[in-house]
Image (cartoon, grey):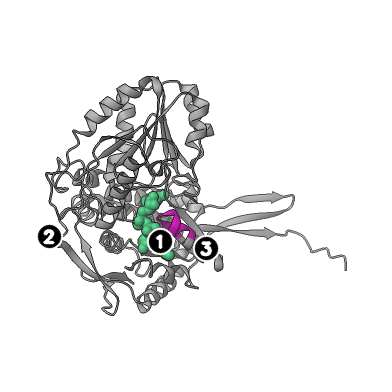
Amino acid sequence: MKAQPPASHFIDGEYVEDTAGTPFDSIYPATGEVIARLHAATPAIVEKAIAAAKRAQGEWAALSPMARGRILKRAAEIMRERNRELSELETLDTGKPIQETIVADPTSGADAFEFFGGVAAAALNGDYIPLGGDFAFTKRVPLGVCVGIGAWNYPQQIACWKGAPALVAGNAMVFKPSENTPLGALKIAEILIEAGLPKGLYNVIQGDRTTGPLLVNHKDVAKVSLTGSVETGKKVAGAAASSLKHVTMELGGKSPLIVFDDADLESAIGGAMLGNFYSTGQVCSNGTRVFVQKGIRDRFLSRLKERTEKIVIGDPMDEATQLGPMVSRAQLDKVFSYIERGKAEGATLLTGGGIPNNVSAEGTYIQPTVFADVTDEMTICREEIFGPVMCVLDFDNEEEVIARANGTEFGLSAGVFTSDLTRAHRVVDQLEAGTLWINTYNLAPVEVPFGGSKQSGFGRENSLAALNHYTELKSVYVAMGKVEAPY
Ligand code: NAD
C-alpha cells in the first residue's frame, strides 16, 4: 500500500519539497508498512510558508465574510463528495477502522467548513455603542498569520477545526500535522485550493517537536492553536508568551464518567465503551475514569466484559472491524507499560491487557482493556494513557463522587448517566470540565463549543465561540461635536 504525496509540504498553492530536511517515514499502523517517505521542514521551508501566508492574508481579509464563507462551503461539498477516498487516507494515516473514519473524520472536517462558511456573513459583525450624541462601534478583525499544530488522533478533523474558523475570519494559516500522521492535512490544503481559496492562505508543513518551535517563535505569527499533550501545551504556551501571541490550547485529559444506580445500564455501558475504545482509545476527551455506583457495579461489570469481548479487532480497511491498531509502536509500548503498572498497583484486570491473536504481528494492536477495583491514587487513574484502557471505580454517593471526579489537574470533559434529571443538572454544575455530557458521551458537533479547563487547556474550538479566538476587537470612538480641552 502506498500513499506517497507529490511532496512533503504544501505552500502557496502547490506541493513543495526540500530534501535537505530530515527524512521520515509514514507507517501504516496495521501492518508496519512504509506508505510514504517525507522530509521535515527546514528553516527555509518554514520561512517560505509564513511569507506566503503573510503575503496572501491582507487581500483575503479585505473580502466580505460572505465571499470567504462561500469558498469554505464549497470545500465542505468537495470533502463530502470524496468522503471514501479521504476516509481511506485517514485510515492509512492513523490505523483507525474505516467503519469510523467514514462517519467521523472527513465528515466532521466538512461540518467545520460548512458551519463556519455558513455563519460567516452574520457572525463577524461588530457592535454599535450609543454614547449620548457621540457613539462608538466595534469591528472584529483577523489576527494575521495563525499557526495550527495537530495531534495524531484526528488529523483531518484537527486540520479543519483550526483552518475553518481561522480562514473565515480573514486569517491565513500555516498548519503542522503530527509527524505520525502527515498525510491528511495535505489533502485538505489541496481541496481548499480546488474550492477557490487563494494561494498562500492554507499551508501545510511537516515536522516534529523540533519544527514546531520554529513556527511558535516566528515574529510574523500572531496566534498558535495547539492540539496535543499538557506537557507540549506548557512548552508552546510558554514560548508564545515570550512574544505575547494569542494561543488556544486543546490538551489532554483524564475525564470522569459517572454512572448512577438509576442509569439505563446498557446506554451507560455503551457510553463508557464509546468513551474508551473509539479510535482505539486515542481520544482526548475520553471518559477514562468510569465511576459506577455500588448498587449496579456487578451487573455493570459483567455486561461490560461481555460486550467488550465481542469487539471485532482486525484489518482497519474491513468495514466489519471495530477496533484498529494504536497509531505507533511507541504509543503501544506506552499503553502496555500502563497496563503492567495497573496490575502491579493492585487493580483487577477484568478483560484484555494483551495482543489480539488474529492480527499481523507487525501491526500495533492491543486488546480493549478494562480494569476494575481501581482507586483514585493508582497511576492508571491519574495519568492520561491514551489507549483503549478503561478504569472502573466504585462509589457510594453523589457528594463523594463529585469530589473524586474533580480530584485531578485535568478538566477537559465529564459525563453523567442517570435517569434523575435534576441530579444530572446538579452534578454537571459541579464538575470541573469544559465539555460535559448527560446520558451520552463524546459527541462533539461543530455547533457546540469544545475545549477544556484547568490543565486541559483554554480557548474553544467549534461554534461561534471559536471565532473569538481567531479575531480581535477594534473599538472606534466617533465624536459628533467639537473637542473641549481645558487648556
Ligand atoms: P504531542 O503533545 O506529543 O504533540 C502534539 C503536536 O505538537 C505534534 O504535532 C508535535 O510535533 C508538536 N510539538 C511537540 N512538541 C512541540 C514544541 N515544543 N513546540 C511546538 N510543537 C510541538 O501530542 P500527541 O502525542 O500528538 O497527541 C496526543 C495528545 O494530544 C494527548 O495528550 C491528547 O489528549 C491530546 N489531544 C487533545 C485534544 C483536544 O482537543 N483537547 C484532541 C486530540 C488530542
Callout 1 environment at 10 Å: few (<14), some (14 to 19), or many (20+)?
many
Q: Nearer the viewer, mark 3 or mark 2?
A: 3
What residue is pinned by disc 2? 1
Of the residues tagged 1 and 2, which is closer to the observer? 2
Residue that numbered label 1 is attached to:
148
The residue type indicated by label 2 comes to: Met
Image coords of residue 73 (percent x, y) = 33, 52
What's the distance in space between the residues labelled 1 and 3, CA to CA? Answer: 16 Å
Q: The residue tagged with tag 1: helix, strand or loop?
A: strand
Which residue appears at 17% of the width and 38% of the height? 312
Q: Is residue 326 left or right of residue 173?
A: left
Residue bearing the label numbered 3: 238
Mark closer to the chain start, 3 or 2: 2
Identify the mark at residue 135; answer none if there is no mark: none
| For marks 1 and 2 on the same chain, the one whose residue lies earlier in the sequence | 2
Q: State whether residue 96 is above or below residue 180.
A: above
Q: How many marks?
A: 3
Q: Point out the stretch of residues depicted in magenta.
A: 225-234
C-alpha separation, residue under disc 3 versus residue under disc 2: 41 Å
Closer to the camera in the image, 367 or 271: 367
